[in-house]
Image (tube, rainbow, N blue to C red):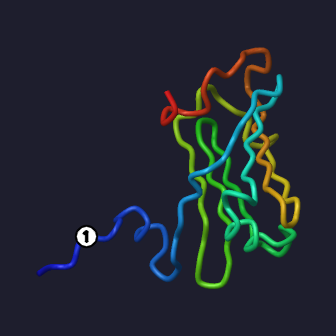
């Protein structure tokens, strides 16, 4: 029997590494920003791989309507990619912080600071 088809998206993202999607996270509207929390309890492997966040282990690519956070470890990467954000963000003001062994916090700077976000992205509508 033929092998089942591999996940084309993950294969295209990285041929060499095992890519895992970060599926469990929480978020909150903080006024001028939106914060996304990737907690150790639900993402132990990704948080362990991030270590202290230094040395290019954690990277973020922010665009006006999307962002991708990638945590690299040896031969494996963990990715949180959100497209179709509820409203535009200001990429150069967005950031992330690693609290070693605990969590990764992504801060999205809203383009329209006074507008409340009802959802995070199209996937959650």
State the residue at coordinates (79%, 42%).
107
Image quadrant in which you'd find residue 33: top right
Q: Is residue 120 left or right of residue 15?
A: right
Task: Work out which residue is located at the far left of the displayed protein and give it.
Answer: 1
The percent coordinates of residue 51 (x first, y second) are 82, 72
What is the quadrant of the N terminus in the image? bottom left
40 relative to 73, above or below: above
Please name whichever residue, 119 or 39, is drawn nearer the observer in this view of the structure.
39
Q: In the image, what residue occupies the spot 49% across and 32% down? A: 122
Task: Give the residue drawn at x 49%, y 73%.
Answer: 14
Q: Within the image, what quadrant is residue 109 found in?
A: top right
Secondary structure at numbered mark 1: loop
Q: Classify mark 1: residues with Cα within 10 Å, few (<14), some (14-19) or many (20+).
A: few
Residue 35 occupies which quadrant of the picture?
top right
Between 42 and 88, the one nearer to me in the picture: 42
Q: Which residue is mark 1?
A: 5
- Picture coordinates of residue 38, whole percent (x, y): 72, 52
Q: Position of residue 96 (x, y in %)?
A: 80, 52
Is 90 rendered above or below residue 2?
Answer: above
Q: Is residue 97 placed above or below 7 in the rendered structure? A: above
x and y percent of residue 59 in the render? 72, 62
């Amino acid at each position: 029997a033929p092998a089942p088809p591999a996940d084309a998206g993950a294969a295209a993202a990285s041929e060499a590494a095992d890519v895992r999607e970060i599926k469990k996270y929480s978020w909150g509207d903080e006024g001028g920003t939106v914060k996304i929390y990737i907690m150790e309890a639900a993402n132990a492997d990704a948080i362990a791989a991030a270590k202290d966040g230094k040395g290019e282990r954690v990277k973020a690519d922010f665009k006006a309507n999307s962002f991708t956070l990638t945590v690299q470890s040896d031969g494996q990467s963990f990715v949180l990619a959100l497209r179709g954000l509820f409203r535009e963000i200001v990429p150069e003001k967005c950031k992330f912080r690693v609290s070693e062994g605990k969590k990764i916090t992504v801060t999205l700077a809203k383009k329209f600071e006074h507008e409340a976000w009802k959802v995070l992205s199209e996937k959650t509508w």
